[in-house]
Amino acid sequence: MFEGLSHLARNARSWPFEQSRNLLARLLRQRLASDAERDLASALIEAGKVGEAVAALPALGEPVVFQCGYGASGLPHLGTFGEVARPTMVRNAFRAITEEAIPTRLLVVSDDMDGFRKIPDNVPNRAMLEEDRDKPVTSVRDPFGEHESFGHHNNARLRAFLDGFGFDYEFVSATECYRSGRYDEVLLKVLERFDAVQAIMLPTLGEERRATYSPFLPISPRTGRVLQVPTLERRLDRGAIVFTDEDGTLTEVPVTGGAVKLQWRPDWAARWTALKVDYEMSGKDLIDSVRVSNRICKVLGGEPPEGFHYELFMDENNQKISKSKGNGLTMEEWLRYGAPESLAYYMFQSPKSAKRLYFDVIPKAADEYLQQLDAYNRVAAEGANAAANRLDNPAWHVHAGAPPERSSPVSFSLLLNLVSAANASDKAILWGFLSRYLPGATPDSEPLLDRLAGYAIHYYEDFVRPAKRFRAPDARERAAMEDLLARLKALPEGLRDGEVIQNEVYEAGKAAGFEPLRAWFSALYEVLLGQSQGPRFGSFAAIFGLDRTIALIERALRGEDLAA
C-alpha cells in the first residue's frame, strides 16, 4: 500500500511526516551501534532502499512501537479519540517513509489499574460508585450493569468505537500488565532503584506531599483500595514493601503480581520501559511530566520515546475537556451529526493550536474535509508530477493513504439549508430535491452524500431549528428582493445552474446599493431561512428548485410565517 512513496515522503511537509522523520532518526541513533552502521543505513534509506538497510542491519527492523494512553475512569470522549487518531497518522507516514520495511505496532494502553477517585457527572448509580471509590477502576462495579467492572465497561466503549472506525491497534490493559507479570521486571527495578526515583520525584512535589510520597501505591489486601501511603520498608530479597494499611496494620506485599501499582509519572516511565515504546504524543499540559518521566525511564534502563506535544481541546466555555466532568462532545454525539472522516480531519488540523470541541465545529469540519478530498482528487488527476502534494493533503492522512475517489457533490452547509427550507424530516424528502439537481444520482451511487443528508437532518433538528429567528425585510431589503424575484422569474424554467442564479443575486444586491454585499446575503438568510449565514445562495436555489425559491421569496414578501 505504501510502496514507492519513500522518495516523496522524505520531502512531505505535513506534521505527521515531520514526526516520522524524527522517529526514523531516533531509530538510527538508538539501534545502530556505530557511526559506520548509521552512515550505511542513512545512505540506503536516502536511496529509497529501506528493505536493504533492514536486511543489512537487522536491529533496524525490530518493530517500532507507537503508544497512547486512555484514562478508564471516565467515559471516552473525542479527546480520547484524538489520542489514537493522531499517532495513527504518524504511524502511516512512517510506513510510507520506510515503505513498510520496518514493522510497526500501535498500543492503546488503558490506565484501568488507577484508583477511582472522581465520579463522572454523566453516569448513573453514583451512590454505588461512591462505595467503590479509590479501588482500581477494574474493581469498581459497572454502574450500567453491563460489564464485569466500570473499567471493563469503558474499555469496551473505547474499543467499539476504534474498531468501528477501522483503527489498526492492540488494546493493552494496565491491570493485566500488572497482574500477569508483564511489568514485574520493571517493578523490581523501581524497588531496586527506589532512591534514584525518589531523587527525581521529590523536588517536583510540595513539602507536605514529599513527606509521604512513594512511587509505589499498594492495594490494600483488606479493602481493595489503592492507597497513597509511605513505603516504610523495602525488602529487596523478597521483592516487597512494607506499609501501614487502612486499619493501622503493618502490611507486607510484593511489588509484583498486581499487589501494587505505580504513581502515574513513574508508571508512565515504567510502561515505556516494559513495552519498549518508541513514540508517544501528549498534551501541552503534560510537558513537565514528560520531562520527569523521561528521567525516570533512563533510571530504569529504558530509552524515553520520541514525543510530540499537542494543544488541548476546549468546550464551548473554553474549559479543558475532562472525562470526569463529561463536558464537550462524546464520540456518539459527533457521529450523530458528522461523518467519522470529518472528525479525523478535525484531529489532523493544527495539532499545536487549541481548538473548541463542541457541536458548532462539526459543519465547518465537514465542509473543509469535503474541500480537501476534492482537492486531493483533482491533484490525483494531474498525474505523477503532482503526487508529492497529495501526501500533504489532510485526506491522505484521514484515509491512511487511500482516500476515496468520489467526494460529495453537495456541501454539508447546503444540505443544512435545504433541510431548513424544505422542512425535511427524512432523507427521502431531501433525495427528492437532490435527484432532480443531480440526474441519475441515488443513495447507492452517492453514499457519502446520503450519509451527509442523514447527519444534516439530525443537526438541523437539534441545533438549527431551535435557534431559527425569522424577521421581516426592511424597505431596502424588500425592494431588493422584489428585484431579485423579477430576475429569477425571467430565467428559464427549471434552470439548475447555480452560477447563473448566483449572478442574478449579486446584481440585485449591487443594484440596491448593498456595500458590502455580505449584508445583502445575510438579509436573504435571515428573512428566508431564519439564520444569519448560509452557503452560496445560487447553489442553494439550484438544488431547492428555482420555482420553490421564487415561492419562498414571495411568501416572505407577503409576510407569511416561514417557520410553520
Image (tube, rainbow, N blue to C red):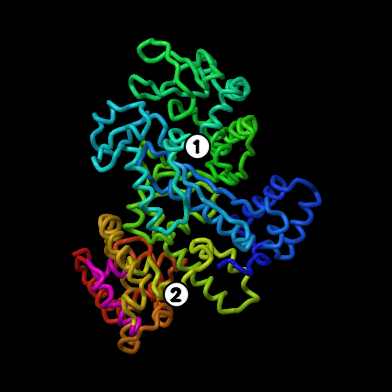
Quadrant position of the C terminus in the picture: bottom left
Foreground pick, 238 / 116: 238
**Is residue 265 highlighted in magenta?**
no
Foreground pick, 337 / 87: 87
Indicate which label's residue lies in the foreground, 2 or 1.
Answer: 1
Foreground pick, 99 / 437: 99
Numbered circle sitting on residue 213: none
Determine the residue positioned at 21% across, 72% down: 558
Q: In the picture provided, is 103 more to the left or to the right than 527?
A: right
Q: Is residue 298 above or below residue 255?
A: below
Residue identified by numbered label 2 = 406
Q: Which one is earlier in the sequence, the residue at label 2 or at label 1?
A: 1
Residue 126 position, x and y percent, is: 25, 32
Residue 363 position, x and y percent, is: 39, 60
Q: In the picture provided, is 377 more to the left or to the right than 523?
A: right
Secondary structure of the residue carrying numbered label 2:
loop
Residue 412 position, x and y percent, is: 38, 66
- Magenta stretch bounds: 418-440
Furthest-bottom residue in view? Answer: 492
Residue identified by numbered label 1 = 182
Q: Amino acid at mark 1?
A: Arg
Determine the residue positioned at 57% across, 43% down: 277
Q: CA distance from mark 2 to mark 1?
A: 46 Å
Q: Which class describes the residues within 10 Å of circle 1: few (<14), some (14-19), or many (20+)?
A: some
**Is residue 432 highlighted in magenta?**
yes
Q: Amino acid at mark 2?
A: Arg
Determine the residue positioned at 47% across, 74% down: 405
Q: Which class describes the residues within 10 Å of circle 2: few (<14), some (14-19), or many (20+)?
A: some
Q: Is residue 224 above or below residue 378?
A: above
Secondary structure of the residue carrying numbered label 1:
loop
Q: Main secondary structure of the magenta part?
A: helix
Say which quarter of the image contains residue 179: top left
